[in-house]
Image (cartoon, rainbow, N blue to C red):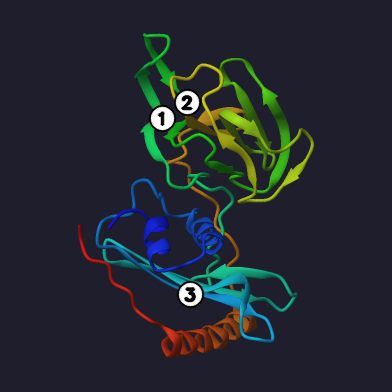
Amino acid sequence: NQSLFLAGNKASVPNSVLAELIRLYSWDVDFQRDIRTGDGFELMYERFSDANGKPVHNGDVIFATLELSGKRHVIYRHTLADGSVDYFDEKGQSARKALMRTPIDGARLSSGFGKRKHPVLGYTKMHKGLDFAAPRGTPIYAAGNGTVQHAGRKGAYGKFVLIRHNADYSTAYAHMKRVNTAKGRRVKQGQVIGYVGTTGRSTGPHLHYEIRRSGRQVNPFRVKMPSGKKLKGKELAAFQTARAAIDSQYAEQAQPVKFASR
């Protein structure tokens, strides 16, 4: 009825698990535009208890489904033969992409990519990124694995982070309240690198986000994200066996929750 995060809170899902769920879907789902009233989600995650049965901490997401406008997006946690862990859809395609389109949760897209009248300068100017309005202090995530090339103040960008992901792609994050990384540091996708603020040339708290290809800004919503690993042969067969076991476990334990419309 509202946001995925609020719906999860009402269903008593821990915030840490919700944050992980949102991160896992952030490669394909635009949480500002794809979530609609009446959509739903299913979730199974680990919960660890002590000898007395008292919950101690929560673990990984094992299975999840997002139903968006009638279409199901399913992911399963799976350990590969080499011991690495990833998330895959029903066909064995990795849910992971090279870059997240929206490296922030619970924000509103306030300005898209393209020409606009600049809110501070007052004249029409090309806006070479996306702006996500959010409360001060909202965590900002690294859109992909990479190396921090800049972390600190940078002119009109205010407090700014630039991450190089590979020979072609880098991402930029501007107007932060506080930077949570340093130049030269390696970061992982989904790691918190800073917090929303309004430093630099800004009229209010928001994240200005850029994807740069060969040094030039491109529209994040139009970039074709490289796909992750696709399982084949014995790996795919092992995954399908594990998937069937997860489906069976979920069917035994699922407890549906439905919220009334406002």
For residue 91, the mark is 3
Disc marking residue 239 = none
Q: Residues within 10 Å of mark 3 (few under 14, many from 20)?
A: some
Q: In the rendered structure, which amino acid carries the disc numbered 3?
A: Lys
**Do the numbered discs 3 and 1 sit on residues whose CB atoms are within 8 Å?**
no
Residue 218, horizontal then vertical, whole percent = 49, 32
As drawn, 29 above or below 195: below
What residue sits 68% from the left and 50% below the top?
188
Choose the circle earlier in sequence order: 1 or 2.
Answer: 1
Please give the label number shown on residue 113: 1
Which class describes the residues within 10 Å of circle 2: few (<14), some (14-19), or many (20+)?
many
126 on left or right of 230: left
**Residue denoted by label 2:** 128
Front position among marks 3 and 1: 1
In which quarter of the view is residue 254 placed?
bottom left
Q: CA distance from mark 3 to mark 1?
A: 34 Å
Q: How far apart, in angstroms, are the residues tagged by discs 2 and 3?
A: 36 Å
* Residue depth check, mark 2 versus mark 3: number of the one nearer the observer: 2
The residue nearer to you, when weighing 129 against 195, is 195
Q: Residue furthest left?
A: 262
Q: Are marks 1 and 2 in contact (CB under 8 Å)?
A: yes
Q: 184 above or below 116?
A: below
Tag 2's secondary structure?
A: loop
**Residue drawn at 60 percent across, 65 percent down:** 229
Give neighbour class at mark 1: few <14, some 14-19, many 20+ (Cα, 10 Å).
some
In the displayed structure image, the side of residue 171 where residue 81 appears, left or right: right
In the rendered image, residue 209, in percent from the top left (x then y), is placed at 52, 33
**Label 2 is placed on what type of residue?**
Lys
